[in-house]
Amino acid sequence: MIRRFSREKLEILLGQFPAVALLGPRQCGKTTLALEFIAGRDAVYLDLETPSDLRKLGDAEDFFARHANELVVLDEIQRQPDLFPVLRGVIDRNKRRGRQAGQFLLLGSASLDLLRQSSESLAGRLATLELTPLLADETRAAGLPVEPLWVRGGFPESYLADDDAASLRWRLEFIRTYLERDIPALGPRLPAETLRRLWTMLAHAQGALFNAAALAGALGVSGQTVARYVDLLADLLLVRRLPPWSGNTRKRLVRSPKVYVRDSGVAHALLGLATADDILGHPVAGASWEGWVIENLLAALPDGAAAAFYRTGAGAEVDLVLALRRGERWAVEIKRSAAPVVGKGFYLGCADLKVSRKFVVYPGRDSYSLGDGVEAVSLSAAVDELRARSR
């Protein structure tokens, strides 16, 4: 069992809110975490994709009344949006009877429907927590190697597969399931092959500025269709749109977001890259590693922090700007090289933003100065420092 760092946050939120929504893509470990969490507790678990469990909710109010003193776990909650008004009524009745927190744990693999319904029905009653695929510090803490995590991605069955070939087969099946079942169920119909091409084009352009018109021209569909499906992939937590910095720097700023396929293993599978040698010999290697580092850093951000990238028409550029509490800003450059070199654009961006910390995340283990206040650090050191800010 790999200990998930989200478990402590889940415990805190269930002690404060009547309901907590644990969100993440399919197969990232939500159910495993939930079952481990409720072991030994007064709790009941229902999988809403299972007909036998669905039948138990034929009279949902009666079911919840009979389990009023237990934590009720509802898996794949976005499949049954009609339950949200019922949950609201149950939570409000329980509040009048003196029960405030820890009533429902809702697991969802599609934030689009889940958040829309919860915002309408459970405002003030629901906290959300995102569970990502496995992170570098989680595997490190478990004594497992970190390098395969970048190659295979963080979905547990992919990362823990017997070999790279088995891992790739799992990821290809994961992609096929999303293309043929999950995405068509949530969005307007687009041929699976066209959607695969779009997803693959995003993997090729890992970390590039989002250009719906260019993608649409290559696919033979409208720009609105491309934007709609990228929105859906983002809502499914499969794609990240990293926003541009929007503060007032009196500079001409880039306004388009950067787009990343969030799981590096899925990106590699879309490109047919099975091994570390395959990836390192492909032009996407640097951008893929950048996206993987960003996912690990953002998962460690303290509450209230925000992330963006910075780019101006004059050539200033910072891969990742972290806005922490009390106006503190960190500038992060991400380099796959074992001997990273920082360009002029990074220094210009740091000067524009008046950052308090400047560092480069690179694949090595040691931390050392690059001069001019810039420090080269390992991913684990950067994550550890961010997690320390969360305490």
Image (tube, rainbow, N blue to C red):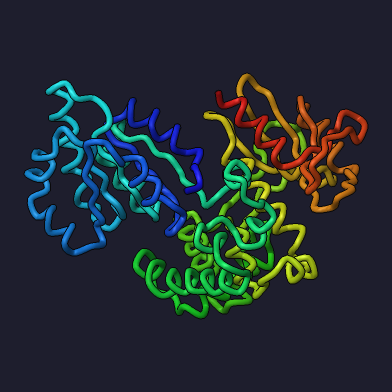
Q: Residue at x 16, y 43 (%)?
A: 86
Residue 318 at least partly seen:
yes
Q: Quadrant of the C terminus?
A: top right
Q: Residue at x 69, y 55 (%)?
A: 147
| Depicted 25 relative to depicted 348: above or below | below
In front here: 215 or 381? 381
In-image side of 352 versus 10 (left or right): right
Q: Position of residue 41 (x, y in %)?
A: 26, 36
Residue 215 at least partly seen:
no
Total numbered badges shown on the rendered structure: 0
Q: Position of residue 54 (x, y in %)?
A: 17, 58
Q: Residue at x 71, y 55 (%)?
A: 289
In-image side of 237 versus 213 (left or right): left
Q: Position of residue 325 (x, y in %)?
A: 61, 23
| Depicted 282 relative to depicted 45: above or below | below
| Depicted 144 relative to depicted 184: above or below | above
Place residue 248 in its image quadrant: top right
